[in-house]
Amino acid sequence: MTENITDRSVSEKKSVSETDVWASDKGADLGILLELGSIGAGNAATSMSEIFQEQILIEVPKIHTLPPHLVSKFYQKHDVPTTAIYMQLRGEADCDMLLLFEVEEAKKIAAMMIMAPSPEDVDPEMEASAIEELGNIVIGSFLTALSDFTGVNLVPNPPQRVVDSFDAILDSFLIKQLLASDRAIVFDTYFKRADGNISGILMMFPSRQLQNVLTEKAKKWVTGNG
Amino acid sequence: MWTPLFQRLFSINTLGANLTKIPQNSVNSPTATKKHFASQFSQSVVVQNHAATPIEEVRVNMADMKVEDRPVALVTNIGSCVAVCIHDAINKCGGLAHIMLPSSSVTHNKSFPLKYADTAVPALTEALRKMGKSSVALSAKMVGGANMFPNMRSITLNIGEKNIEAVRQALAAEGVRLLAEDVRGNYGRRVSFNVADGSVCVRNGNGEVKEI
């Protein structure tokens, strides 16, 4: 199941033209962000391993930055039912973070978290609560890494969960992003465990201010003046 | 291995029935809810209408527009954005625009006119008038403008509402009559616009299906 999803997304991503997407191998600032993502994911993996009582690895294999209105075209998941955890960050710089799972995947994760024998046994309210908590952990760990690196103080609001089709969830964020800047930053994340992988998408919609801070930091880091 | 295949077959089979009406009394039973859920989000590319003839679906992306004179269904998913469906009943053609923002004046970057209501609606009507080769009376239907995250602090400055208003004004300025609308709420919608007869089928996030 997971492999199918991965294959499909890889093959269909090509439909968005190369010039629209900046992949992680282009540009030093993206390389830095990818590094940040990996550090954040490392923190998250440690917390998750404690919850699940087994070893969990999170990989952030790819980072993309692309114009906001092309994000849904890029993923080609228009009608796919999706569970999303949304966290809004306040503080010195604004940022929206979004963690997305397909509904079935979210159920599987919730079952793992509350140690239910199968996804069908999970109470919907328990699922909601578990998934929100997961969002809190993953996004929180990511933010810690981001905060440490940039020195920007980021204060998250409590997580909110929403279930709808992929495109419908995204478009509210994309509208805001269109107003703020012309780029959205998207990480593909994979949770690895003994029984197989679970794939999710971590999206970051930084404000223009935060983007500037990140680019500045990245430049300094590369030239060795940081 | 068998489960996804089974679900897929199952959901396509139930889709025809689902389009007509979901029986109220069956919604509460656990099996019915499951059925309902599977068909609500089914990913089939072929939709059956009442006459059970499959219609080809053409996907319209965000900040994009499609105009068709073949008998197809234009499909898009909508949250806070607004989908404007304009139909030319005489020439049996129609177009759908996925509009994201109310006005092109809010941004310095005007490279993408189809993002904005005040530029996308004129572009759509012009394309349709060209396609129909006459300036016939066009009619419009509007879907979307939801507020997906009611608790979100000022995230989109209630952009859904502004989008709805901007589309109304743009349509009035173009002299296009607004026949029907399905707007607001806090759920996403899947819009399927049948270009041949001008009907718009809306399936919302709660799984309700209606035709406007």
Image (spheres, coloured by chain):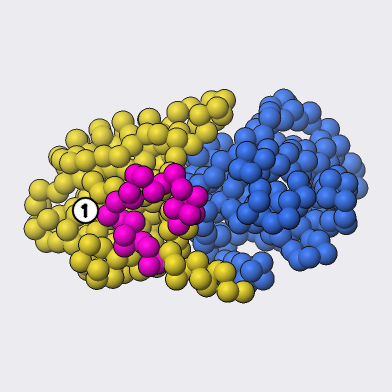
Q: Is residue B120 left or right of residue B100?
A: left
B29 inside magenta stretch: yes
Q: Is residue A175 left or right of residue B176?
A: right
For the point 38% across and 37% down, the residue is: B145
**Residue A27 appears at what percent x and percent y?**
73, 57
Instruction: Look at label 1 and name its amino acid.
Output: Ser
For the point 87% across and 55% down, the residue is: A54
* Tag 1 residue: B199
For the point 66% across and 48% down, the residue is: A122
- B17 vs A40, nearest the viewer: B17
Q: Which residues are magenta?
A: B12-35
Whether residue A115 appears in this view of the structure is yes
**Residue A160 appears at what percent x and percent y?**
62, 35
**Residue A102 appears at what percent x and percent y?**
60, 55
> Circle 1 sits in a helix, a strand or a loop, which is it?
loop
Q: Colour of chain A?
A: blue
Count of marks overlaid on the render: 1
Whether residue B57 appears in this view of the structure is no
Magenta: main secondary structure equals helix
- B52 vs B101, nearest the viewer: B52
Q: Colour of chain B?
A: yellow
**Local crowd at mark 1 within 10 Å, few (<14), some, or many (≥20)?**
some
Q: Is residue A16 left or right of residue B111?
A: right
For the point 48% across and 54% down, the residue is: B31
